[in-house]
Amino acid sequence: MHLIAWDEVPEEHLAQGIKRRIVTGDKVMLGRLFIPKGARVPAHRHENEQISHVLSGLLRFVVAGETVMVGAGETLHIPANVEHSAEALEDTDDIDAFSPIRTDWLDGSDTYLREEPPED
């Protein structure tokens, strides 16, 4: 039996109010996000495909220019290298899965969840 431990990502890497925890394995990485109502994840893209499963709440995604509403219990597949953004229309808890794992999640360099880029 293996226990899963969620690692907290430092708040300075996130837009205000967003909370993120991650767990990684050999072949898959899971990120759990809490996005408060009204918070936005700016447009970005990943080299990996992404599966987003909303546990509770409601997200308005814009994927390749198309608006997609994803509510509790629903899942969205975002292909690799496709630009996407999200806005929480309600307090939202979701899980994102990536395969292969994303190393930028491990070192905190993925600052796309910030409202503005970090200052040097």
Image (cartoon, grey):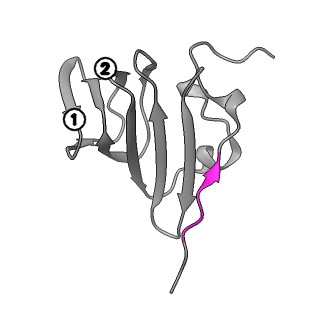
The numbered mark at residue 71 is: 1
Q: Eyeballing the image, is 119 above or below 69?
A: above
Q: Few, some or many C-alpha atoms within 10 Å of disc 2 (few <14, some 14-19, many ≥20)?
A: some
Between 72 and 40, the residue placed more toward the observer is 72
Give the residues in magenta: 4-8
Q: Eyeballing the image, is 104 above or below 13?
A: below
Residue under the image location 43 percent in, 42 percent down = 47
Where, quadrant-wise, is the C terminus in this rendering? top right
Q: Eyeballing the image, is 114 above or below 34?
A: above
Residue carrying label 2: 89
| Left-right relation of 22 to 97 | right
Q: Give the x, y percent position of residue 89.
A: 31, 20
Between 30 and 78, the residue placed more toward the observer is 30
Figure quadrant of residue 35: top left
What amino acid type is highlighted by mark number 1?
A: Gly
Q: Is residue 57 magenta?
A: no
Judged from the image, the secondary structure of the residue bearing numbered disc 2 is loop
Q: Main secondary structure of the magenta part?
A: loop
Q: Give the x, y percent position of residue 77.
A: 24, 44
The alpha-carbon separation of the residues under discs 2 and 1 comes to: 10 Å
What amino acid type is highlighted by mark number 2?
A: Leu
